Image (cartoon, grey):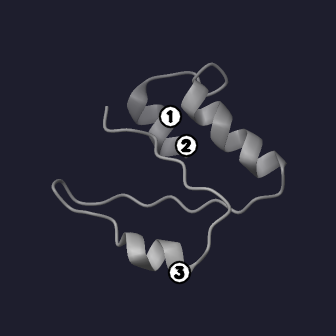
Amino acid sequence: MGSFAAAASVRSADDDRIRGLRNRLEEGSWLLLAETRPGGELPWTLVQRARPQAVVRLGDG
């Protein structure tokens, strides 16, 4: 999460995307960050089999 905030050149306290992740952490949720190669896809069937409480996508840019 730190590298995302640094790369995006944003103050993490002010960025809604980061705030949403922090809220989940404060609720006691686990956080898994996954990054794919350009043009790659996340293995959604595998993710769904893990039965996550929520999936949050930060976006492409």
Residue 19 image-quadrant placement: top right
- Residue 2 in the image, given as x and y percentages of width and height: 55, 43
The mark closer to the camera, 1 or 3, is 3
The kind of residue tagged 2 is Gly
Residue 49's label in the rendered image is 3
- Residue 21 in the image, given as x and y percentages of width and height: 65, 43
Q: Is residue 37 left or right of residue 28?
A: left
Which of the marked residues, 1 or 3, is nearer the chain's N terminus?
1
The residue where tag 1 is placed is 5
Against 7, is 35 above or below? below
Q: Alpha carbon of mark 1 to alpha carbon of mark 3: how far?
A: 29 Å
Residue 55 image-quadrant placement: bottom right
The residue where tag 2 is placed is 2
The kind of residue tagged 1 is Ala
- Residue 22 in the image, given as x and y percentages of width and height: 71, 41
Residue at point 54% right, 48% down? 56
Q: Quadrant of the C terminus?
A: top left
Which of the marked residues, 3 or 2, is nearer the chain's N terminus?
2
Q: Is residue 17 left or right of residue 35?
A: right
Secondary element at image label 2: helix
- Residue 4 in the image, given as x and y percentages of width and height: 46, 40
Secondary element at image label 1: helix
Q: Are marks 2 and 1 in contact (CB under 8 Å)?
A: yes
The kind of residue tagged 3 is Arg
- Disc 3 crowd rating (10 Å Cα; few below 14, some 14-19, many 20+) is few
Secondary element at image label 3: helix
Q: Is residue 39 left or right of residue 11?
A: left
- Disc 2 crowd rating (10 Å Cα; few below 14, some 14-19, many 20+) is few
Q: Alpha carbon of mark 2 to alpha carbon of mark 1: how far?
A: 5 Å
Q: How many marks?
A: 3
